[in-house]
Amino acid sequence: MMDYLQILFASGIVIGMLFILYGIAMKRRQVEKGLINIIAYKVLDHRRGVAVAVMKIGSELLFIGVTPSDMKVLSRVKDTEPGLAGKVTEGGTEIRALASHIRNKLNEDN
């Protein structure tokens, strides 16, 4: 009977320590998440694997062109206007206009 209590107590300590370590890891992850945020990601051509991503790094928005073999910064915008990052969403007009422009450029190349 005493052995079962020792095993139960030791298991409780191990599980408690795992919860504590999980909480610490999640706090660190939230701090790291604040540095670089992906605001929007729009696939332009599934066949070619072409997409546009909008990332916020610090106070700057980066429009990035993504292909299977490369990533290039298409445009940089300072996030000085309050709420600018909220306007650049997948449903927002800014990323739609940029995606349309890139899609037209891709069609011209063919």
Image (spheres, grey):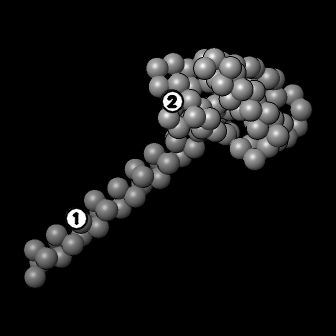
In the image, what residue occupies the spot 35% across and 55% down? 18
Q: Quadrant of the C terminus?
A: top right
At mark 2, the secondary structure is loop
Q: Which residue is mark 2?
A: 48
Is residue 66 depicted above or below 92 in this figure? Answer: above
Q: Amino acid at mark 1?
A: Ala
Comes first in the chain, label 2 or label 1: 1
Residue 10 is labelled as 1
Is residue 83 depicted above or below 101 in this figure? Answer: below
Number of marks in picture: 2
Q: Amino acid at mark 2?
A: Arg
Please give left or right for residue 110 compared with residue 76 in the image: left
Tell me if I can see residue 79 in this picture.
Answer: yes
Please give left or right for residue 61 compared with residue 43 in the image: right
Q: Quadrant of residue 84?
A: top right
Q: Position of residue 38 (x, y in %)?
A: 63, 37
Tell me if I can see residue 35 in this picture.
Answer: no
Q: Measure the alpha-carbon separation of dots 2 and 1.
A: 55 Å
At mark 1, the secondary structure is helix
Q: Quadrant of the N terminus?
A: bottom left
Q: Position of residue 78 (x, y in %)?
A: 81, 23
Label 2 vs label 1, nearer the camera: 2
Q: Quadrant of residue 96?
A: top right
Q: Position of residue 80 (x, y in %)?
A: 87, 28
Q: Position of residue 31 (x, y in %)?
A: 59, 39
> Mark 2 packing: few (<14 Cα in 10 Å), some, or many (20+)?
few
